[in-house]
């Protein structure tokens, strides 16, 4: 006890120094920009400086000791553990996509804020302190010891299933992070997307490869500081600009009525209505084409061929020929393809034909049923995110790293505190950015578009992240003519607010920090599950500690490369990938963890059945209701989105455990004793 | 106590959303109440709950320790 305050003081001093140097670095880069340093260099400087920093911390903290490698020696003070958890937790989705999601969805988007923060109550009250008391290395460790069963009562089947769940959940999640790393790196350094992925990967590996949990903890604290600064500076700037108050979370209340007024004005504007009518017309065209299949598909194909031939025949310019060629090449290959494409385009056009929804009104809807459906979905998403939070292996793993049970509880408090510093600002950023765009961009002249629009519009030509087109031809930007992708908003905020480019670099570094820290934690969770639970506990219990750590490092490398490969295939967008991981985690792991702590009667048959049932229900619902995975939204139960599949999975898991446990013999004295032990006061 | 805190958590988390439309008529400094609860209120309540729980459990733990010291046999 006596040595701890000095350890804590030393750490605080280090990180104060670090924050100070980071501020100096920012000022220096800002000065360099004044001197005319090119933008690309600033991007490079931020990328490489921060990655080098993380790598340095990784090298300093390198270790081959088992306790250090798996749980950072169990001596991370609560506050720093909280900070590291926050960095672990604030993923690329929170940092990059969430504010954009709120911007696009208004009140509905707040489900993410509520779900992601509310879940920590479950962690603190139901799970984390008990895991710490148990004091082992991984989540499967806990489940195997609690439920036993299998050969020799060592719980091999339960352990294997928990490992499987950990890997599936973490892998889905880590792919999303690495994808974000590639997006940011390619945007700010101009390298190819896949090169960006492998660059980011290298920095993740240096850190976790050498030092395991210990290196990751200290890197994550550093990353948290960067991402906090990166998120707060541009938001505070916007807030001071529009609300004359640099505290965004307090200030944006005064903007809400103004925004609502502007929204109402835009909803009535006749020019906006003109643009919306044009989108409705386009949607009707697409609908007519779908109705006319398959004849319309053949006609369209002939038309595209004819255009190309005509362009060639009249010796048109190269660009025109190219354009015609591309139109033919991208033309749908078959009738079903065409149906899918045109339906999608019709929906997109219809979506843009709608008037803007009031930002602060809960569940706007034409009818009571529509509004109710949105409310139910909101609740379902909140539910999934909360229970998912309480079951994410890389967050729960952090419960093992503190010196005592009490410190674990306090560290969850700090974790939520540090997360809230960012999360209370995210809705503010969405409102501020919306206000800025609605008042200064909408209504401006097309000849005087700000440069950030053309900049972002050219990042990805096939699916433009930002698009503005003069649809009704009046030369003035209407709101309905402007479309922005959720993933861009935060990255573009500094430019939207007219800040110097150095801030844009800082935000990118913050996004990178968010993605890297989460990816670190997840990769470690996966490789620990594989090396500790599968290799050490199941395959080769006699392995030396040295060998275990080495195996873990090798596995980490392998998993990281597979994840990077999957990410380079560009799967679905970040937010929906992450939400899928949450639903799966919640339905599979949450019921066994909680019943394991609080219900002595739960036995290993119940645990196995429960994990299978939760996982299966969740996966089945996603497959059934998600159009992306081959189902259809018509089959949805109670109109719940496939993203919120956990709303069925969690109860299914809980119910199965209860029923199967009651049908099979009660667990032995060992697990009873263990439950008593972990629930006893210290 | 855990159960009680969970009830508070449920009420703030799900209750305010369920009745969001009704609540949005009230405002709390310029903010519509339901928007405020969803954006900040619910999260702050969670933070308070966790803080309270950590503090309360520590006092309970200490009390249990003291009791154990007085009667070493138990």
Image (tube, helix red, strand yellow):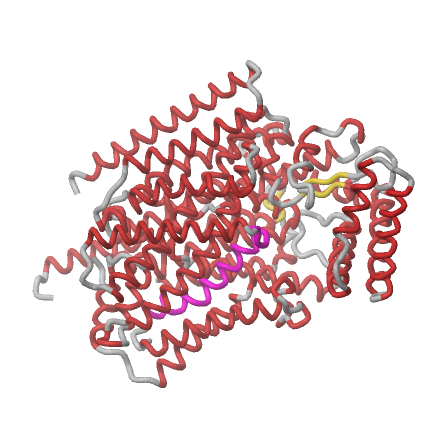
Residue A528, placed above or below residue A620: above
- Give me the residue at 54% from left, 53% from top: A112
Q: Quadrant of the N terminus of chain A?
A: top left
Regarding residue B51, the answer to whether it shows in the image is no
Q: Is residue A111 shown left or right of residue A414?
A: right
Foreground residue, A165 or A223?
A: A165
Residue A24, image x and y in percent?
Answer: 42, 21
Q: Is residue A644 shown left or right of residue A128?
A: right
Residue A81, image x and y in percent?
Answer: 33, 44
Where residue B21 sits, quadrant-wise, is bottom right
Q: Is residue A626 shown left or right of residue A520?
A: right
Residue A664, placed above or below residue A353: below
Q: Is residue A586 magenta?
A: yes
Q: Quadrant of the C terminus of chain A?
A: bottom left
Q: Is residue A125 magenta?
A: no
Give the magenta range: A570-596
Residue A366, placed above or below residue A238: below
- Give me the residue at 36% from left, 35% from top: A55
Secondary structure mostly seen in the magenta stretch: helix
């Amino acid at each position: 006890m006596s040595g701890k305050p000095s350890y804590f003081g030393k750490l605080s001093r280090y990180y104060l120094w670090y924050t100070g140097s980071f501020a100096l670095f920012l000022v220096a880069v800002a000065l360099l920009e004044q001197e005319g340093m090119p933008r690309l260099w600033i991007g490079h400087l931020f990328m490489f400086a921060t990655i080098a920093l993380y790598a340095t911390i990784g090298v300093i903290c390198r270790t081959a000791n088992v306790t250090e490698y798996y749980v950072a020696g169990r001596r991370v003070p609560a506050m720093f553990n909280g900070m590291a958890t926050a960095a672990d937790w604030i993923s690329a989705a929170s940092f990059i996509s969430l504010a954009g999601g709120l911007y696009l969805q208004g009140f509905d988007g707040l489900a993410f804020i509520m779900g992601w923060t509310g879940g920590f109550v479950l962690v603190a009250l139901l799970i984390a302190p008990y895991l710490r008391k148990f004091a082992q290395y991984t989540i499967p460790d806990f489940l195997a010891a609690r439920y036993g069963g299998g050969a020799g009562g060592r719980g091999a089947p339960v352990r294997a299933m928990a490992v499987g769940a950990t890997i599936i959940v973490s892998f889905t999640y880590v792919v999303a992070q690495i994808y974000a790393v590639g997006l940011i790196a390619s945007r700010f350094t101009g390298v190819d997307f896949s090169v960006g992925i492998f660059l980011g990967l290298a920095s993740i590996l240096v850190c976790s490869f050498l030092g395991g949990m210990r290196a990751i903890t200290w890197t994550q604290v550093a990353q948290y500081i960067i991402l906090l600064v990166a998120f707060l500076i541009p938001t505070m700037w916007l807030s001071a600009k529009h609300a004359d108050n640099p505290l965004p979370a307090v200030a944006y209340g005064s903007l809400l009525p103004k925004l609502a007024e502007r929204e109402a004005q835009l909803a009535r504007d006749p020019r906006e209505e003109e643009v919306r009518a044009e989108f409705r017309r386009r949607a009707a065209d697409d609908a007519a084409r779908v109705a006319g299949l398959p004849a319309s598909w053949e006609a369209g194909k002939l038309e595209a061929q004819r255009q190309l031939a005509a362009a060639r025949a009249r010796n048109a310019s190269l660009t025109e020929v190219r354009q015609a060629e591309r139109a033919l090449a991208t033309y749908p290959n078959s009738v079903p393809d065409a149906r899918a494409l045109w339906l999608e385009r019709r929906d997109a056009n219809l979506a843009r034909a709608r008037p803007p929804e009031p930002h602060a009104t809960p569940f706007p809807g034409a009818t009571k049923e529509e509004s109710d459906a949105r409310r139910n979905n909101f609740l379902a998403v909140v539910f999934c995110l909360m229970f998912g939070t309480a079951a994410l292996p890389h967050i729960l793993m952090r419960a093992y790293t503190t010196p005592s049970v009490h410190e674990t509880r306090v560290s969850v408090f700090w974790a939520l505190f540090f997360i809230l510093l960012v999360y209370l600002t995210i809705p503010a950023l969405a409102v501020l950015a919306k206000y800025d765009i609605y008042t200064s961009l909408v209504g401006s002249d097309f000849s005087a578009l700000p440069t950030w629009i053309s900049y972002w519009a050219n990042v990805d030509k096939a699916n433009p992240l930002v698009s503005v087109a003069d649809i009704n031809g009046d030369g003035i930007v209407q709101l309905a003519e402007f479309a922005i992708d959720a993933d861009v908003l935060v990255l573009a905020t500094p430019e939207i607010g007219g800040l110097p480019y150095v801030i844009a670099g800082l935000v990118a570094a913050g996004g990178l920090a968010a993605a890297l820290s989460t990816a670190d934690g997840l990769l470690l969770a996966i490789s620990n599950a594989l090396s500790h639970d599968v290799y050490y506990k199941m395959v080769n219990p006699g392995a030396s500690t040295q060998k275990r750590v080495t195996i873990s490092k090798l596995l980490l490398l392998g998993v990281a490369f597979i994840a990077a490969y999957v990410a380079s295939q560009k799967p679905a967008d970040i937010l929906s990938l992450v939400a899928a991981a949450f639903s799966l985690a919640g339905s599979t792991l949450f019921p066994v963890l909680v019943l394991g702590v609080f219900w002595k009667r739960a036995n290993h048959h119940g645990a196995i059945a429960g994990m299978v049932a939760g996982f299966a229900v969740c996966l089945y619902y996603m497959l059934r209701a998600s159009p992306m995975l081959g189902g259809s939204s018509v089959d949805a139960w109670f109109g719940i989105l496939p993203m919120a599949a956990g709303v069925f999975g969690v109860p299914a898991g809980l119910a199965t455990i209860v029923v199967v446990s009651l049908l099979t013999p009660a667990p032995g004295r060992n697990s009873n004793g263990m439950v008593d032990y972990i629930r006893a006061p210290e | 106590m855990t159960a009680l805190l969970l009830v508070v958590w449920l009420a703030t988390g799900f209750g305010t959303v369920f009745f969001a439309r009704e609540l949005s008529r009230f405002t709390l400094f310029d903010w519509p109440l339901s928007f405020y609860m969803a954006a900040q209120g619910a999260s702050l309540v969670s933070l308070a709950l966790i803080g309270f729980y950590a503090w309360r459990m520590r006092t309970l733990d200490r009390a249990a320790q003291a009791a154990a010291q007085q009667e070493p046999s138990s």
